[in-house]
C-alpha cells in the first residue's frame, strides 16, 4: 500500500485536505494526515508531530507558501517520490529544491487526479 503524507490536514470535512485523505483511503492508498490540531479523519488520526515515515510515495501539500518554509528540511529528508503542490500552495523555491533532490514536484490537484484515475504511480 503506497503511503501519502498529507501536510495541512484538517478535521473539517469540507476542507480539501480532509476530502483527499478520505479519497486516498478509498482508492487503496495509506494516507498519513499531519496537521496542527488533533483529531481524526474517518478513524485515521491526524498527527501533530512530524512522522518519520519510510518509503513515502508522495507528500501532498495543503499549506500556503508562507508556512511551508518551516517544513523544507523535513520534506526533503523524507525523500518522497512525488511532491504535490495543490492549488494555492505553489512555491517555486521548494519546487526547485525538491527537483534538485531527485523528488518529482508537480503543481496539481490531488482530488482531481484521484477522481479521474491519474494519480502518479
Image (cartoon, helix red, strand yellow):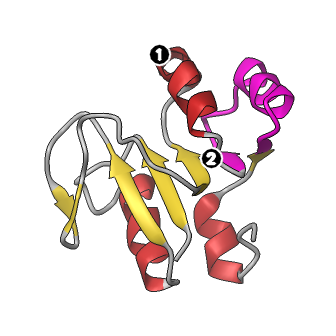
* Vertical arrangement, residue 6 with respect to residue 14, above or below: above
Depth-wise, is mark 1 or mark 2 nearer the camera? 1
In front of the other: 99 or 9: 99
Residue 80 image point, x, y percent = 64, 47
Question: Mark 1 falls on what kind of element?
Answer: helix
Disc nearer the start of the sequence (1/2): 1
The residue lying at 75 percent from left, 71 percent from top is: 121
CA–CA distance in space, label 1 to label 2 = 18 Å
Q: Residue furthest left?
A: 39
Q: How crowded is mark 1: few (under 14 residues within 10 Å), some or many (20 or more)?
A: few
Residue 58 image point, x, y percent = 61, 54
When asked about the image quadrant of residue 40, the answer is bottom left
Residue 20 image point, x, y percent = 47, 64
In the picture of the structure, the residue carrying the numbered disc 1 is 70
In the picture of the structure, the residue carrying the numbered disc 2 is 86
Magenta region includes residue 89: yes
* Vertical arrangement, residue 82 with respect to residue 95, above or below: below
In front of the other: 97 or 107: 97
Q: In this view, does 44 lie to the left or right of 31?
A: left
Magenta region includes residue 109: no
Q: Residues within 10 Å of mark 2 (few under 14, many from 20)?
A: many
Range of magenta residues: 82-105
Q: Which residue lies furthest to the front in this view?
A: 54
The residue lying at 73 percent from left, 52 percent from top is: 108
Residue 99 image point, x, y percent = 83, 33
When asked about the image quadrant of residue 115, the answer is bottom right
Disc on res. 87: none
The residue lying at 44 percent from left, 48 percent from top is: 53
Question: Mark 2 falls on what kind of element?
Answer: loop
In front of the other: 35 or 64: 35
* Vertical arrangement, residue 21 with respect to residue 47, above or below: below
Amino acid at each position: 500500500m503506497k503511503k501519502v503524507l498529507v501536510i495541512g490536514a484538517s478535521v473539517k470535512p469540507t476542507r480539501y485536505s480532509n476530502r483527499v485523505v478520505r479519497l486516498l483511503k478509498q482508492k487503496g492508498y495509506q494516507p498519513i494526515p499531519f496537521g496542527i490540531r488533533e483529531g481524526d479523519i474517518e478513524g485515521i488520526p491526524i498527527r501533530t508531530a512530524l512522522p518519520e515515515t519510510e518509503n513515502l510515495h508522495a507528500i501532498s501539500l495543503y499549506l500556503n507558501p508562507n508556512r511551508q518554509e518551516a517544513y523544507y528540511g523535513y520534506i526533503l529528508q523524507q525523500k518522497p517520490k512525488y511532491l504535490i503542490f495543490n492549488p494555492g500552495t505553489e512555491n517555486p523555491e521548494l519546487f526547485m529544491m525538491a527537483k534538485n533532490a531527485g523528488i518529482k514536484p508537480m503543481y496539481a490537484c490531488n482530488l482531481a487526479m484521484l477522481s479521474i484515475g491519474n494519480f502518479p504511480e
